[in-house]
């Protein structure tokens, strides 16, 4: 049973920083892709950043240079360091894991809210 638990969201002023965490358990494949998605009210869920188990990473254009995805394998935890936050970054942020980085059938966490004012 795959479980993803996000934490670290909150309210911050524009220009501030937050670090999101996603504790993962129960995923048995040695090759996988993990990612952060976000969804604002009335909008689709979009991928923000992804990291393959081989270490390759990718970012949406809107967050390049501001967000960094990383993973602590010993803690089975995925992170998203968010700097220079903007009001348009306000959204519910979700962690996901799948065998493929196209995420055809992801497991999702419950989400953590980020609000930038």
Image (spheres, helix red, strand yellow):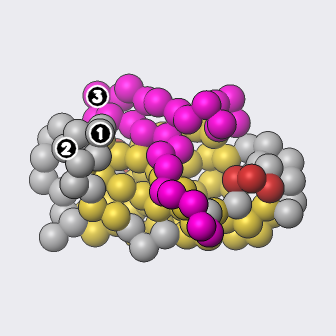
Q: Which residue, given by chain and number where applicable, does mark 3 sit on? A: 54
Check contact, mark 3 vs mark 2: CB within 8 A: no
Q: Which mark identifies residue 99?
A: 2
Residues at marks 1 and 2, CA–CA distance in whole angstroms: 9 Å
Residue visible at 22% across and 54% down?
105
Q: Which residue, given by chain and number where applicable, does mark 1 sit on? A: 102
Is residue 94 in sight in this rendering? yes
Which element is circle 3 on? loop
Sequence-first tag of 3 and 1: 3
Residues at marks 3 and 2, CA–CA distance in whole angstroms: 12 Å
Could you tell me what secondary structure mostly forms the magenta stretch? loop
Asked if the magenta segment contains residue 42, the reply would be yes
Single out the residue that lies furthest toward the front: 42
* In this rendering, position of residue 28 left or right of residue 24: left
Q: Which mark identifies residue 112?
A: none
Which element is circle 1 on? loop
Q: Position of residue 94 (x, y in %)?
A: 47, 61
Which element is circle 2 on? loop
Q: Position of residue 63 (x, y in %)?
A: 65, 37
Q: Dot 1: few (<14), some (14–19), or many (≥20) neighbours within 10 Å?
A: few
Is residue 9 in sight in this rendering? no
Q: Quadrant of the N terminus?
A: bottom left
- The magenta segment: 41-66
Check contact, mark 3 vs mark 1: CB within 8 A: no
């Amino acid at each position: 049973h795959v479980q993803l638990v996000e934490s670290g969201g909150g309210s911050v002023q524009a220009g501030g920083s937050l670090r999101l965490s996603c504790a993962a358990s129960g995923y048995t494949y040695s090759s996988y892709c993990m990612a952060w998605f976000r969804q604002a009210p009335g909008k689709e869920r979009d991928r923000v950043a992804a990291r393959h188990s081989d270490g390759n990473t990718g970012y949406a254009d809107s967050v390049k240079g501001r967000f960094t995805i990383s993973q602590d394998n010993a803690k089975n935890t995925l992170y998203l360091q968010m700097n220079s936050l903007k009001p348009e970054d306000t959204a519910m942020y979700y962690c996901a894991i799948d065998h493929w980085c196209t995420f055809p059938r992801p497991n999702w966490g419950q989400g953590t809210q980020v609000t930038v004012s």
